[in-house]
C-alpha cells in the first residue's frame, strides 16, 4: 500500500496525501500528545552516548516501564509532554528514538495529523499541486 493510502486509512481523511513529501518543521507537537515512546536497546545506547551519561543513568533519569510491561518508555511531563522536550526543541533530535524517526511513515494519529505543522504544510503543497 502506498504511503498516502496508509495516511488515509489511519487518519480516515478523504484527502490523498503523499507522505514521501513530508518535511518535519520541528514544531514539537508530536512530542506533546498522549502516548508512549518505546525505546529499543539501540535507542538507549545511542541516546546515553549522546548525552554523555551511562545507560543506567539514562534509564533511571529518563525512562519508566511501559504500562504493558513489555518495554521501557520515555517519561513524560505534564501528563503528556516528552521529558526530553525543551523550549528549544528536542534535546536529542540528532539521535532520537526509532519510534520518533518513524513519524509519519510508520505511525500517525488523527489528533497529530490535524495539528502537526509538517502535515499542514504538506496539505498546502498537495492542494497547490492539484
Image (cartoon, rainbow, N blue to C red):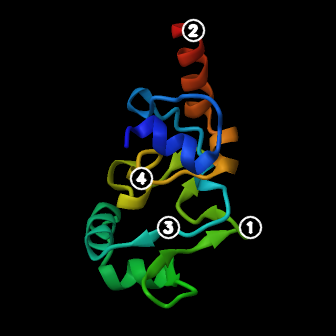
Q: Position of residue 107 (x, y in %)?
A: 48, 54
Residue at 46% of width from left, 85% of height from top? 60
Q: Is residue 124 visible?
A: yes
**Is 30 situated above or below 127?**
below
Mark before the other along the chain sequence, 2 or 3: 3
Q: Find numbered disc 1 in the image and state the secondary structure of the residue it sits on.
A: loop
Residue ID for mark 3: 37
Do the CB atoms of the residues marked 2 and 3 lie less than 8 Å apart?
no
**Is 9 situated above or below 49?**
above
The answer to whether residue 7 is left or right of residue 2 is right
Residue ID for mark 2: 128
Instruction: Give the distance between the C-alpha atoms of the residues marked 4 and 2, in whole angstroms.
Output: 26 Å
The answer to whether residue 75 is left or right of residue 53 is right
Instruction: Give the distance between the C-alpha atoms of the residues marked 4 and 3, in whole angstroms.
Output: 13 Å
Residue at 59% of width from left, 24% of height from top? 123
Mark before the other along the chain sequence, 2 or 1: 1
Q: Find numbered disc 4 in the image and state the secondary structure of the residue it sits on.
A: loop
Using the rendered view, name the quadrant where residue 51 is placed: bottom left
**Is 19 situated above or below 87?**
above
Query: Quarter holding the C terminus?
Result: top right
Mark before the other along the chain sequence, 4 or 2: 4
Q: Would you call the spot at circle 2 few (<14 residues within 10 Å), some (14-19), or many (20 or more)?
A: few
Q: Position of residue 54 (x, y in %)?
A: 30, 79
Query: Quarter holding the N terminus?
Result: top left
Instruction: Give the distance between the C-alpha atoms of the residues marked 1 and 4, in whole angstroms.
Output: 26 Å
The answer to whether residue 128 is left or right of residue 19 is right
- Residue 78 is marked as 1
Using the rendered view, name the quadrant where residue 128 is placed: top right
Residue ID for mark 4: 106
Amino acid at each position: 500500500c502506498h504511503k498516502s493510502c496508509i495516511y488515509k486509512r489511519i487518519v480516515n481523511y478523504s484527502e490523498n496525501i503523499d507522505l514521501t513529501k513530508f518535511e518535519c518543521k520541528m514544531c514539537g507537537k508530536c512530542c506533546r500528545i498522549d502516548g508512549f515512546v518505546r525505546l529499543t536497546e539501540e535507542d538507549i545506547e545511542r541516546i546515553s552516548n549522546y548525552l554523555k551519561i551511562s545507560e543506567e543513568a539514562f534509564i533511571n533519569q529518563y525512562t519508566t516501564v511501559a504500562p504493558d510491561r513489555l518495554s521501557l518508555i520515555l517519561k513524560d511531563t505534564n501528563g503528556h509532554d516528552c521529558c526530553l522536550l525543551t523550549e528549544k526543541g528536542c534535546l536529542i533530535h540528532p539521535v532520537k528514538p526509532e519510534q520518533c524517526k518513524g513519524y509519519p511513515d510508520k505511525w500517525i494519529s488523527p489528533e497529530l495529523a490535524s495539528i502537526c505543522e509538517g502535515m499542514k504544510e504538506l496539505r498546502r503543497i498537495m492542494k497547490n499541486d492539484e
